[in-house]
Image (cartoon, rainbow, N blue to C red):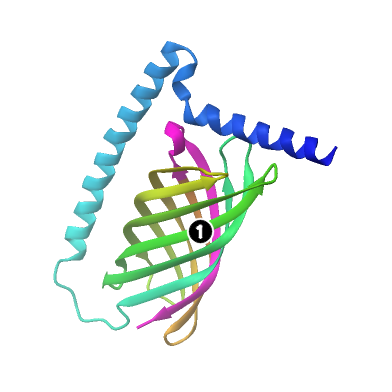
Amino acid sequence: MQRRGTSQRLARNTKVWETLANPGVSQGNETNNKEEEILMMRTTGLRIIGLLLGVFFVALLPAAAQDDKVEVFGGYSYMRFRPSPDVNLNGWEASAQYKFRDWIGGVADFDGHYGSQFGVGESVHSFLFGPQVSLPSKVSPFAHVLLGGAHFSAGGVGDTAFSMAIGGGMDYEVKQGISWRIIQGDYLLTRFFGETQNNGRLSTGVIFRF
């Protein structure tokens, strides 16, 4: 009975991801709608990239000298991964930021989240880059827009696709050079197997400034 239950769970999980991996097997008009969605996302992505380039140009203008240009963050991260069905994943997040000015910097963000569905382990890793703006104070709110990619793996099935994070959070300076990231929340979009997953990510941890 236990082997039969396990086989049923594996069959159900395989069916879910086969559906994601073959989105064109349904109706023809659904394919057209997906092509239009991809074109719209590309157009939106180009607009975002243009905006980010403009922000970076402003940030590179001459400014007064500042200390602590580099920030390194690491800590725990939770992800609500939303293929079909949804699943809760736990893991880590790490990022590094170089501050062009005291209120804006460039961020490289990496994470890994792990869990299982129907007895099959799965993981999601993302690698994102973009600008982050913040209020230079002891309690420092911040916001960012990050673009890049993500990789999904489960039961021998994998895919690497476009990813984007829009979010922000709050940092608290414990002492000079060390801060606590009280909370960071992100809307994390992924495009595994040609489908859009609207995920959520929450993180907390420690920041070191140099």
Tell me the residue at 27%/34% (across/down). 43
Residue 165 at x, y percent in the picture: 42, 50
**Is 4 placed above or below 51 here?**
above
Is residue 209 covered in magenta?
yes
Q: Is residue 56 left or right of residue 126?
A: left
Residue 169 at x, y percent in the picture: 49, 62
Tell which residue pokes out farthest to the right in this image: 1
Dot 1 alpha-carbon crowd within 10 angstroms: few under 14, some 14 to 19, many 20 or more: many
**Is 179 placed above or below 114 here?**
below
Helix, strand or loop for disc 1: strand
In the rendered image, which quarter contains the N terminus? Answer: top right
Tell me the residue at 49%/46% (across/down). 152
Residue 167 at x, y percent in the picture: 45, 54
Tell me the residue at 63%/52% (across/down). 115
**Amino acid type at mark 1:** Gly
Tell me the residue at 18%/74% (across/down). 63
The residue beneath circle 1 is 112
In the rendered image, which quarter contains the C terminus? Answer: bottom left
Is residue 166 covered in magenta?
no
Instruction: Point out the stretch of residues depicted in magenta.
Output: 189-210
The reply to whether residue 181 is visible in this rendering is no
Q: Nearer the viewer, residue 82 or 17?
A: 17
Q: Is residue 9 left or right of residue 76?
A: right
The reply to whether residue 6 is visible in this rendering is yes
Q: Nearer the viewer, residue 71 or 138?
A: 71
Decide whether the magenta segment is chiefly helix, strand or loop: strand
Tell which residue pokes out farthest to the left in this image: 62
Residue 199 at x, y percent in the picture: 53, 45
